[in-house]
Image: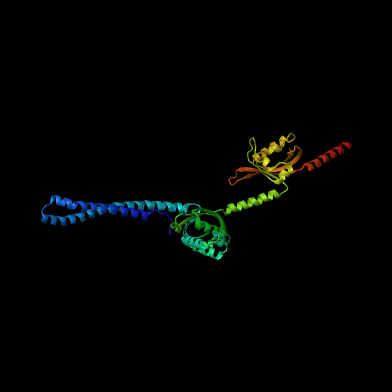
Amino acid sequence: MKFSPSFGYPTEARILAFRITAIYAIAGGVWILFSDELLALFVTDPAASVRLQTLKGWLFIALTAILLFRLLTRSLHEVVRASRAAGVSEDRFQLLFHGVPVSLWELDLSAVKDEIDSLKMIEKRNLATYLAEQPAYVAQLLAMVRVLAVNETTLALFGARQTDELLGALDRLVAPDAMPVFRSALVALAGEPGEFREEFFALTLGGECKTLLATVSIPAEREKFDAVPVCLMDITERKQTDERLRLLESAIEQTSEAVTITTADLALPGPRIVFVNQAFTRMTGYEAEEVLGETPRILQGPKTEREVLDRMKRELFQRQSFRGETVNYRKDGREFVMEWFVTPIVNRDFQVTHFVAIQRDVTERWREEERLRQRLAELETEG
């Protein structure tokens, strides 16, 4: 079975049939009402009138036959033209249906709709609660969903070679963890028409678990439940990326090193801060909302070495990593020596999109090194 739009042929056929019948009835009625009066007006001989009545009957048959022939020819021409146009539309639709890069399904939900509607009339408790308490019944409803058609993207997504492998296989593709989502879909089917959208887990024919975003258009008319379009979008990679980013953000928040992420704008006014962690707040005294959108120059002051900053800009411009240290200033104005390591972040097109900096307060180490240098200088003087 091919997934195809409804072109409304039954309605068009009824209109054509009504048009032919109406024209034939009007023509026949006019003939019956006025032909005898015209014959009596022009023919007074009874014998001739009888002969002309027979001729009139044959003439009526001939004229109505010609009329029907013309009406049917014209109507059939319209039907053929509409059929050809529909064939072109169907071909274009099939190209779009099979070429679109998302999974498209056509499902027959009529049996499920009937079951849910009858359940609403019988079951007085909350429908969602009832379905949650009847897992076997929900599984039975899932098995009642009929897969009518799928596109090429669906075959690739679920690892099928041909459409027949997926027809009637919906209950094998829905992972057990996705049953709550199916229950929510059943409740939506029992409610008002609209769009149902939800994420769920699905299994490919090879047993691989994927995260899909389902969009179901719930029709208003009962007769349209026998061909409900469903769109599935594979968001597995996006969900995995989101999870990795969540873990990375959690790890960054837990680390003792201050982390700053900025945009990659090296021209004035310079890169803007888009992220800092809690260690940055502890080191500088600035809360995240105070520095987001600002430039790292917010930490600089009179003793910040221009030579170090120029070297950093030069090396980052050349897509190199930078390591250095200089004097910076906390929110309360106190000086501290900051050591930081900055590296560019590139996207898949090898374009620099951000800089990430790992920063450390090395004031105590710098003071110890300064005291050591002074001590060595004193020893050289004494010697």
The residue lying toward the viewer, choosing from 374 and 150, is 150
Quarter residue 5 falls in: bottom left
Residue situated furthest top in the rendering: 302
Coordinates of residue 157 in the picture (x, y in percent): 52, 57
Coordinates of residue 54 in the picture (x, y in percent): 16, 57
Q: Is residue 381 visible?
A: yes
Residue situated furthest bottom in the rendering: 136
Vertical side of 2 occupied by 280: above or below: above
Quarter residue 354 falls in: top right
Q: How many marks?
A: 0
Vertical side of 71 occupied by 121: above or below: below
Quarter residue 3 falls in: bottom left
The residue positioned 74% from the left and 43% from the top of the image is 283
**On-image quarter of the N terminus:** bottom left
The residue positioned 41% from the left and 53% from the top of the image is 91
**On-image quarter of the C terminus:** top right
Scheme by which the image is coloured: rainbow
Residue situated furthest right in the rendering: 382
The residue lying toward the viewer, choosing from 182 and 114, is 114
Q: Is residue 223 left or right of residue 301?
A: left
Q: Is residue 321 left or right of residue 40?
A: right
Q: Is residue 255 left or right of residue 234?
A: right
